[in-house]
Amino acid sequence: MEHNYHVPVMLKECIEGLNINPSGVYVDVTFGGGGHSREILKNLGKDGVLIAFDQDPDAQRNKIDDPRFKFVDQNFGFLKNNLRLLGYKQVDGILADLGVSSHQFNEPSRGFSTRFDADLDMRMDKHRPLTAAVVLNTYAEDKLHKIFGIYGEVKNAKSLAATIVASRVNKSIVTLADFKAIIAAHIPKGKENKYMAQVFQALRIEVNAEIDVLESFLEQTEAVLKPGGRLVVMSYHSLEDRPVKSFIAKGKFRGDVEKDFFGNEQKPFKSITRKAVVANEEELSINSRARSAKLRIGERL
């Protein structure tokens, strides 16, 4: 089954970043095809534990048959509570690979890909009521403008939003074909794929509340990691990298580092990597997904 999933990006760098203690407890919060999880298990001894999170029903089929492995069918935004339910207050390391698996893009019915005609869904968790179609058909123009501009960095976000709002008056936008027909005039010639990828990224982030969930997850890692424990996060676009970088550097997403009465910085992590780690040339030549990946590592103080 795993071959349908993506090759894990920067696998060696992720494992090294976790600095694995063979008898420790580790969490892979983005299980997917299980590539990173299998590698973590190889580095654990018989009393080590690996807990994997994934809300995607397709990922559950890749569960690993190993007594040291525990699977949590949840979004990583619920990290702390689920670890408590399993009896773990603190763990030795947490890994998050924030990329959408290529498997999800290749599954037409999920509505993530710009290559297939399908209903505009894009939910990672099918129990959530909000779909891409709901966003396109009900959101106010200024809200759509903001989503495309901020989450997709779409250049003509304002006129795109206006067109969507004007055309849905006559007919609901249900499928990808509907959507493409409506916005055809806005798609720059020769850059169709890149433009649609940006528009889809914006919708996917909104539908799954990805930035809110990411910030909530990062805040929870502070309580969950033991002193000396490692947080290893790989992101694929600046919207995700920014909060990760800020949180590891300052322990918060906006403003300056808190200081105590004596002027000492009060921050939960020490940054292990001065700059983001990026894939080497050899990996880039065999895995195009690695091109935009940025890896950051923090150690709990």
Image (spheres, rainbow, N blue to C red):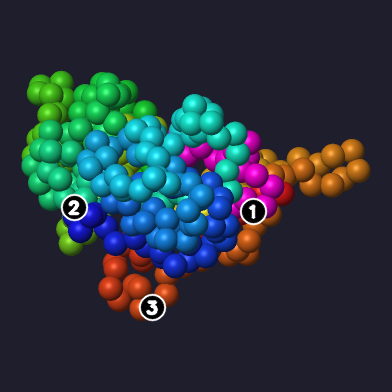
Q: Of helix, strand and loop, which one carries label 3?
A: helix
- x and y, in percent, of residue 101 in the image: 28, 50
Q: Provide residue 296's location: percent of width, then percent of height.
A: 54, 57
Q: Mark 2 packing: few (<14 Cα in 10 Å), some, or many (20+)?
A: few
- Crowd class of label 1 (few under 14; some 14 to 19; many from 20; radius 10 Å): many
The magenta stretch spans residue 221: yes
Towards the viewer: 301 or 288: 301
Q: Which residue: 44% across, 37% down?
A: 76
| Magenta-tinted stretch | 213-230
Q: What residue is pinned by disc 1?
A: 299
What amino acid type is highlighted by mark number 1?
Answer: Glu
Q: State which mark lies toward you, 3 or 1.
A: 1
Element carrying mark 1: strand
The numbered disc on residue 1 is 2
Badge 3 vs badge 2, beta-carbon distance below 8 Å: no
Asked if residue 3 is among those painted magenta in the image, a careful observer would answer no
Which of the marked residues, 3 or 2, is nearer the chain's N terminus? 2
Which residue is at 12% across, 29% downward? 174
Tag of residue 281: 3
Please, what is the three-letter code of the amino acid marked with disc 2?
Answer: Met
In which quadrant of the rendered view does residue 256 lie?
Answer: top right
Visible residue check, residue 250: no
